[in-house]
Image (cartoon, rainbow, N blue to C red):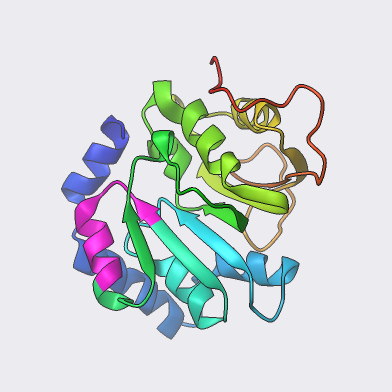
Amino acid sequence: MNDDWAAWRARTDLDAYDRRWEQLARDGANPHGEADRVEELLPGGGGRVLDAGCGTGRVAIELARRGHHAVGTDLDADMLERARRKAPDLQWVEADLATLDLGETFDFVVLAGNVVRFVATADRGAAVHRAAAHVAPGGRLLVGFQLVPGGPTVEDHLGWCAEAGLQVERLDATWDGAPYAEGDYVVAQHVRPLRPPSGATDRPPTR
């Protein structure tokens, strides 16, 4: 993780963090855009989903509620423990995304909530590469992050995914599909072809 992450954690009360999402739902807002996107692509449940950088479990728990098999991973032990308490029947794995190897693949890998932005700069490419390694043939990687100075750019992200053998399907400005037009947030959707494209590699990225 990087200094932005350390600063966010230092000022964030995790109880208040969870209550914020609950309050959004009570106020009629939709806090589950990531789960909605998965449902759009695979309605009715039954998908295998990895919530990489799961935090306190919001996305994985909602996907499990909708009938998907969800697994959550995070490097923050405190956040992961909260996820376990809320959903003890789900699989929660403490792991560094830059070296993640669960030994299995998924229909969807989701990196929500600025996961890529909060990874140390030198490890961002490796983190995306390792997330992509868990995408099954025909499966998808869904990534959302803010575009801020010092953070990953759209071009960075597209390059890492191409190196990992993924093809971009769409770029949006929000999880509910607002078109991306050079704004300050991007949601990128990538697919792993059934046949590996020429030039794809399992080696870590070089940038």
* Image-quadrant location for residue 158: top right
| 192 in magenta | no
Residue 78 position in % (x across, y down): 19, 57
| 75 in magenta | yes
Residue at the image point whose x is 66% and y is 63% from the top: 176
Tell me if residue 178 comes above or below residue 16 in the rendering. Answer: above
Tell me if residue 41 comes above or below residue 148 in the rendering. Answer: below
Please indicate whether residue 161 sits to the left or right of residue 57 in the image. right
Position of the N terminus, as image quadrant, is top left
Labels in figure, total = 0
Residue situated furthest top in the rendering: 206
Does residue 12 appear in the picture of this structure? no
Which stretch is magenta?
73-84
Does residue 205 appear in the picture of this structure? yes
Which of the two residues, 17 or 127, is positioned nearer the viewer here? Answer: 127
Tell me if residue 121 comes above or below residue 81 in the rendering. Answer: above
Please indicate whether residue 1 sits to the left or right of residue 15 in the image. right
Predominant SS of the magenta segment: helix
Residue at the image point whose x is 49% and y is 68% from the top: 70
Residue 180 position in % (x across, y down): 71, 45
Residue 5 position in % (x across, y down): 29, 39
Please indicate whether residue 109 sits to the left or right of residue 75 in the image. right
* Image-quadrant location for residue 17: bottom left
Which of the two residues, 33 or 158, is positioned nearer the viewer here? Answer: 158
Tell me if residue 201 comes above or below residue 48 in the rendering. Answer: above
Residue at the image point whose x is 43% and y is 73% from the top: 61
Residue at the image point whose x is 57% and y is 53% from the top: 109
* Image-quadrant location for residue 198: top right
Residue 172 position in % (x across, y down): 70, 50
